Image: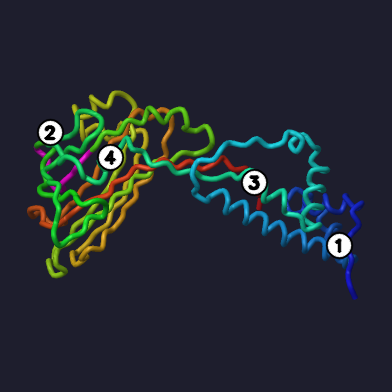
Amino acid sequence: MKEHYPAAADAAFLEKVVRYQDGAMPAEEVAAFEKEMHEDASKRGAFADAQLRSMALHERFRQDAFRVLPPVKRSVWFASLVSRPFGAAAAGLVFGLLCGSFAWAVASPRAVATAERLFALVDGGFEKDAASSGFPKQLGGWSGDASEVVVAEDVKAREGRRMLRFVKAEGDANALDGPAISCDVFQLVDLRPLRANLGADGNSLLELSANFLDARPSDTGLSVTFCCQIFLFKGDAANVHQAWPNNISEAIASGSAEVTTLGGSGDAWKQLTAKSLVSAEADFAVVQISARPNLRVPMPPRLFVDDVKLTLKTQPALPVRVVQR
């Protein structure tokens, strides 16, 4: 026998459905609500249909919220929807679902995450100049331990034609008594132009990605660890070199990623991504890329890095549902 859903006038039952789904129904009412559905097949059908449509709509919103798209024009919700009493708005929403109309959901403004590449990171493809010597003293440009920009005949660059080869591990100017265990290359990046957008629409995340290649033969017997790191600071970027690396603890945020290889990678580049939350307090970032042999030996040959990028990702502030269990 064909079952019929409740009539459109039964808004009270539909409001109960919404309260039940949201966990807002007191325990003493839950038993009565379940008994009501047990005794009425049409209400059971309406409840099941509402559950299915609610899950479908939730999945649509979830996918839209985390889909990375170009920046979109900001939209404003209709004030009339916000100003409605909860019960009427909830019943109207469920009635719309039960009637099978999703037109308003498809046409509604999308809450999307945005990703913007920051070209304040200079020459991430190493197509211009070789890295300078020593820790950088000004914004823009690579500087650090001994390295060289090369074009290798038997290795294809990850981006463009040229790439950086790690040559030698050198000590830090402010820690000359410490061991030189890795070849490190740095860049200072100005973050102040980002302040107008940070925190306005949600959480902001800086992502530093770098591609590394271990082009040694597979039988070297020596492992190498590649690493990319990002440190966020307040203050004047021109002063950070005076105490580096002893002032790393002053960073207001940081992120790192690393991978260990044994050679034999051929031309298979490995991408690492370091992530750090960023706020309007950050004035500049220290970007660091490095290669470290895991035995105290000279830097092995044929260790490369290329296609270094800095990306600002902003996730919209989504509503939070608090569930008590």
Q: Magenta stretch: residue 184 in it?
A: yes
Crowd rating for badge 1 (residues with CA inside 10 Å; few <14, some 14–19, many 20+): many
State the separation of the CA atoms marked 3 and 4: 37 Å
Q: Are marks 3 and 2 in contact (CB under 8 Å)?
A: no
Helix, strand or loop for the magenta stretch, by majority: loop
Q: Which mark is residue 173?
A: 2
Question: At 62% across and 37% down in the image, what residue appears?
Answer: 75
Q: Are marks 2 and 1 in contact (CB under 8 Å)?
A: no
Q: Is residue 72 left or right of residue 267?
A: right
Mark 2 vs mark 1: which is more N-terminal?
1
The location of residue 176, given as percent across then percent down, is 10, 36
For the magenta stretch, what is the residue range? 177-186
Q: Which mark is residue 321?
A: 3
Q: Are marks 3 and 4 in contact (CB under 8 Å)?
A: no
Which type of secondary structure does the marked residue at label 1 adopt? helix
Q: Amino acid at mark 3?
A: Arg
State the separation of the CA atoms marked 4 and 1: 60 Å
